[in-house]
Image (tube, rainbow, N blue to C red):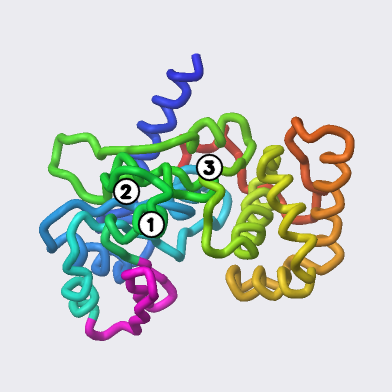
Amino acid sequence: MVDSKIQKLENELRARVSRFVSDNSKWCSYRYKALQKIREFKGKAFLCGGAVRDILLSDSRNNIIPRDLDIILGYSEIKNVADSFSDCTKRWNCYGGVSIQVKDWSIDMWPLDKTWAFKNNYVEGKGFSDFPKTTFLNIEAVAIQLFCSKGKKREIYSKGFFEAILDRTIEINLKENPNPPMCIVRSLSVAKKFKFAIGPNLARYIKHYANQIELEELLELYQVRYRSIHLSVNELYSCIKAIEEQLRISDREPVQLPVSDNKSYFQPDLWVKW
């Protein structure tokens, strides 16, 4: 039963990504042109991370438009790809990737073998099928082929991604990460946005690092990363306290964060209307 539900989600994701990269997408034409520049280069390109999650969990009644695209490339000439965006703002990072600003879209690209967990030997293998093992959260543990020949299925690789959606619970996938504070911020953001529960391992991780970081610092990270002021110190404090209280009662159960006024974007009954 679970396998059939996962297969259904995979088919839905393929259909949505096909529409996302098409020239008649409900999104904007300059996004399509930017993707076509990437498509011109030889080799595979896979969309991964939060954009995949948002594409799958969006519906016709909300405004979940993935403005931040993470793309892993199966070739190393990243500079040539970046140079093709001559009229866009570019920023190189220390991990061998580049962030390109296309109007209000941010596209982060890097060669697959430069993925942080690969380079630091936390994950064996360096293929696209291995990439889902490298993400901090299970809800990010997915990669789907951006472009494919007509009549061929887009390749999808995942590690707990679809299960996280079915269970409505986010959990740690790979604990090792260079930026624990940002991991906390991202985890809380996703949990609140979709009203997902936080798994026990992630809850312990958040409690551990939250005790070492000022709430104001976490809030500033949240506001800068998500360009939002819709999370107050009190709300952040309530989230941390809810996690601590659940761990005190039992450290084996998922944690439901306090409900805020923000509506949930998770409405699976509307998927087919996307």
User: In the displayed structure, does residue 73 sit left or right of residue 215?
Assistant: left
Residue at x-position 32% and y-position 38%: 156
Disc on the earlier residue, 1 or 2:
2
Question: Residue 270: image x %, image y %?
Answer: 54, 37
Query: Label 3, on which residue?
Result: 173
- Disc 2 secondary structure class: helix
Q: Which residues are magenta?
A: 86-108
Query: Label 2, on which residue?
Result: 19
Question: Residue 197: image x %, image y %?
Answer: 70, 40
Disc on the earlier residue, 1 or 3:
1
What type is the residue that disc 3 sits on?
A: Asn
The quadrant where residue 213 appears: bottom right
Residue 206 in view here: yes
Q: Is residue 93 magenta?
A: yes
For the residues labelled 1 and 3, the Cα–Cα distance comes to 32 Å
Res. 26 mark: 1
What type is the residue that disc 1 sits on?
A: Lys
Question: Residue 203: image x %, image y %?
Answer: 72, 45
